[in-house]
Image (spheres, rainbow, N blue to C red):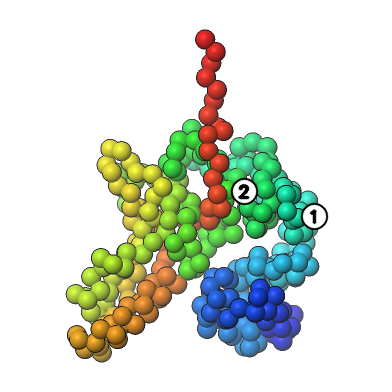
């Protein structure tokens, strides 16, 4: 593999996506603009995660497999991912087609099969190779929205260190911090990743702004009323240094820069891990029918 060929493929992919700009393309891939620019100019290789993300965006099966193979995955392994998906299901599905997505649950002993694969409309599953049906029931180790239900979960981001592509998106995470929390016990939670920019003491702590990150949970605990699960914070080293107090325009620009860095450089607290991005939910069908009287 040579840099020139990689750069050529990446530029061709961006053009195939509507010839979008580099910044928009970088956002879709989940990397910084500067990183993507180095890829397209042939100055640097994508990481394995970068190749996987590029493959997810590619339209044709051959293009997908080419990018994924650069990440070190074999075609046989790719086709066998997540419940033995057949080779023809890697092709771009036609309108009305379905894909069979394996169902799992998360328990104290790890992930285990929860039932037979569930057929779902292909148009709702952009990445069938990394998508699972995530079952939440009485055997699950935590709370996620309701006692029972199924989340359609894209596990491409499972364990990812760079969460920049997930801010503002609904995710499921495993919450097991080192400290004890009475408000949020260890378990499985679903919600939207958010940075609390509006109430942060950016101006009072000019040298080192502290930006907290939360999971805005899909359900609150009735006994406490909490809906925000604290995930940690990002401390910026630059802050408002060098700006005059009356420089509103400069402060607004710097604030955007701080938020951008927080999104790309924030790391989850130890013991907490992203399980994937939620593509949709199926509810109600796990309820047991009432016994006939």
Q: Does residue 120 lie above or below 269 as drawn?
A: above
Q: Residue at x 55, y 22 (%)?
A: 289
Q: Quadrant of the N terminus?
A: bottom right
Residue labelled with disc 2: 132
Q: Residue at x 65, y 68 (%)?
A: 57
Residue 258: percent from left, percent from top: 35, 77
Using residue 50 as the reference point, say whether residue 204 is left or right of it: left
The dot on residue 87 is 1
Q: Does residue 238 lie above or below 188 as drawn?
A: below
Circle 1 sits in a helix, a strand or a loop, which is it?
helix
**In front: 108, or 205?**
205
- Alpha-carbon span between mark 2 and mark 1: 17 Å
Residue 56: percent from left, percent from top: 65, 65
Using residue 263 as the reference point, say whether residue 59 is left or right of it: right
Query: Can the viewer see residue 89?
Result: yes
The dot on residue 188 is none
């Amino acid at each position: 593999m040579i840099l020139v060929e990689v750069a050529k493929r990446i530029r061709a992919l961006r053009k195939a996506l509507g010839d979008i700009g580099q910044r928009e393309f970088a956002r879709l891939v989940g990397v910084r603009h500067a990183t993507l620019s180095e890829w397209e100019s042939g100055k640097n290789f994508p990481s394995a995660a970068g190749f996987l993300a590029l493959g997810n965006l590619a339209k044709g099966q051959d293009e997908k497999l080419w990018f994924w193979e650069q990440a070190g995955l074999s075609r046989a392994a790719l086709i066998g991912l997540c419940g033995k998906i057949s080779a023809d299901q890697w092709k771009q599905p036609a309108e009305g087609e379905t894909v069979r997505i394996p169902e799992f649950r998360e328990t104290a002993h790890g992930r285990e099969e929860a039932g037979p694969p569930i057929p779902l409309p292909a148009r709702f599953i952009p990445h069938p190779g990394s998508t699972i049906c995530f079952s939440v029931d009485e055997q699950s180790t935590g709370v996620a929205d309701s006692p029972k239900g199924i989340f359609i979960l894209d596990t491409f981001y499972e364990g990812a260190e760079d969460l920049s592509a997930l801010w503002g998106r609904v995710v499921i995470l495993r919450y097991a911090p080192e400290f004890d929390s009475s408000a949020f016990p260890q378990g499985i939670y679903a919600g939207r990743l958010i940075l609390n920019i509006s109430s942060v003491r950016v101006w009072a702590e000019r040298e080192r702004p502290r930006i907290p990150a939360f999971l805005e949970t899909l359900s609150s605990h009735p006994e406490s009323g909490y809906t925000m699960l604290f995930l940690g914070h990002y401390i910026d080293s630059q802050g408002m240094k060098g700006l005059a107090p009356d420089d509103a325009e400069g402060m607004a620009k710097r604030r955007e820069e701080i938020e951008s860095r927080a999104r790309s450089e924030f790391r989850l607290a130890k013991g907490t891990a992203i399980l994937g991005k939620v593509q949709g939910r199926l509810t109600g069908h796990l309820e047991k029918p009432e016994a006939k009287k």
